[in-house]
Image (spheres, grey):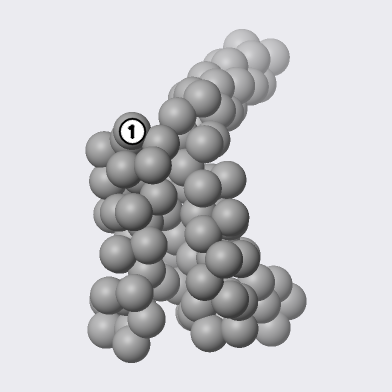
Amino acid sequence: MFRLKADPSSEHLDMLTQEVKDCSETLGLPVPKAYVMPSMTTVPYNCFAHPKGLYISDLMLQDFSPTERRFIILHELAHIKLGHIKVRQRALLAYVLAVAVI
């Protein structure tokens, strides 16, 4: 199984944590934990919301402007606010149960 390894010692973590806090307050959401993940050569720029927090690649933090990062973080937090994460989890569970029945 694939396990995401976030870098708790990233030099960008404090900046990301503050940006996530600011964006969460804008949307009226509780502040999720922020994680910096190492970029992979196949997917150098990546960001996604997960029930455990918001993950963003180190290259996005390094190469994107503050405005671009804010847009991306707000987009991912909107998935949480609109319940898209729960819908995705339910769909996955339904699929697994359907496969198990077959």
Residue 98 % position (x, y): 64, 15
x 33%, y 33%: residue: 28
How many numbered tags mark residues here? 1
Residue placed under numbered mark 1 in the picture? 28
Q: Residues within 10 Å of mark 1 (few under 14, many from 20)?
A: few
Task: Name above or below for residue 49 compared with residue 19.
Answer: above
Q: Is residue 91 left or right of residue 5?
A: right
Residue 92 location, quadrant: top right
The amino acid on which the numbered mark 1 sits, given as a three-letter code, is Gly
Picture residue at 58% right of the left edge, 16% below the top: 94
Give above or below for 7 relative to 81.
Answer: below
Figure check: 4 above or below 50: below
Q: Quadrant of the C terminus?
A: top right
Find residue 83 and report its horizontal and vertical position in percent: 49, 24
Residue at (37% x, 81% y) in the render:
12
> Residue 59 versus residue 38: which sits nearer the camera?
59
Can residue 100 be spotted in the picture?
no
